Amino acid sequence: MSSKLLVSDFDGTMTRREFYRLAIDQLIPRDCLDHWKDYREGRTTHFDALNRYFQSIRATEQQVWDLLAKMELEPRLAELVKSLETAGWRVVIASAGSAWYIERLLNQAGVALEIHANPGSFDPATGLKMRLPTESPYFSREIGIDKAAVVRAGLRRGSVVAFAGDGFPDADAARLVPDDLRFARGDLASLLIAEGLPFRTFRRWSEVAECLLSD
Ligand SMILES: [Mg+2]
């Protein structure tokens, strides 16, 4: 069994752009309510806010496929995951988004990874509907998957654990790993700077993989 584990966020980390941002820009009616405001002000959970946006999507399956392409999944993902596995690193995805689009992108890239995310189904009339993964050992009512719990499980097994992410829901998980195995960009990087926690930054996921491969 592998003793090294890379827990990676998906949207904005393994991809250049986030599904929800692209969806809000392109597939959700302009008059959509500000669900993030409700989340920030404590009236709803992160999961519910995201799910309301996803269910506001009005698009054909083809339009959603086009949107997935615009996320720009790391183009070298298959090759890098293989190299990481050879070097003893197991890669798992921990996402507050939906396994529905993560699985599609990974399948298209020919990559099989363990995914911890919210299951979902798509219908042009009702958008992308997520459900809480209550069966997951890492279930969180707030965001669906407790990313810190995924990291903690690895640490408990005695693995060396690295984490890569770009958003606020990544913060608890990022705090748990050693400084030189903490990879951050975007909002997560800003938050870690404010906390004075060291990290390695990256622009593309390939930089995270290459860093681990060169250590
Ligand atoms: Mg992200």
Image (tube, rainbow, N blue to C red):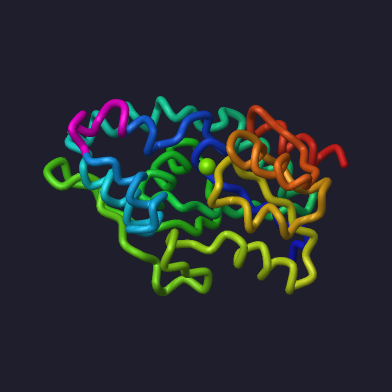
Q: Is residue 114 above or below residue 1?
A: above
- Image point (39%, 33%), residue name: 21
Q: Is residue 119 visible?
A: no
Q: Position of residue 200 (x, y in %)?
A: 77, 38
User: Magenta: predominant secondary structure element?
Assistant: loop
Along the line of sight, the residue nearer the viewer: 173 or 9: 173
- Image point (50%, 59%), residue name: 116
Q: Position of residue 59 (x, y in %)?
A: 19, 33
Q: Is residue 26 visible?
A: yes
- Image point (47%, 42%), residue name: 106
- Image point (44%, 59%), residue name: 143
Picture quarter with the N terminus = bottom right
Give left or right: position of 168 versus 97.
right
Give left or right: position of 22 versus 185.
left
Q: Quadrant of residue 196?
A: top right
- Magenta region: which residues? 24-32
What is the number of callouts on the image?
0
Residue 28 among those drawn in magenta: yes
Q: Quadrant of residue 203?
A: top right
Q: Quadrant of residue 187?
A: top right
Give left or right: position of 200 versus 93.
right
Along the line of sight, the residue nearer the viewer: 184 or 87: 184
Q: Is residue 157 above or below residue 147?
A: below
Residue 142 among those drawn in magenta: no
Give left or right: position of 102 versus 57.
right
Along the line of sight, the residue nearer the viewer: 193 or 92: 193
Q: Position of residue 174 (x, y in %)?
A: 68, 52
Q: In the image as oriented, which residue stretches furthest toward the left? A: 125
Q: Position of residue 213 (x, y in %)?
A: 81, 40
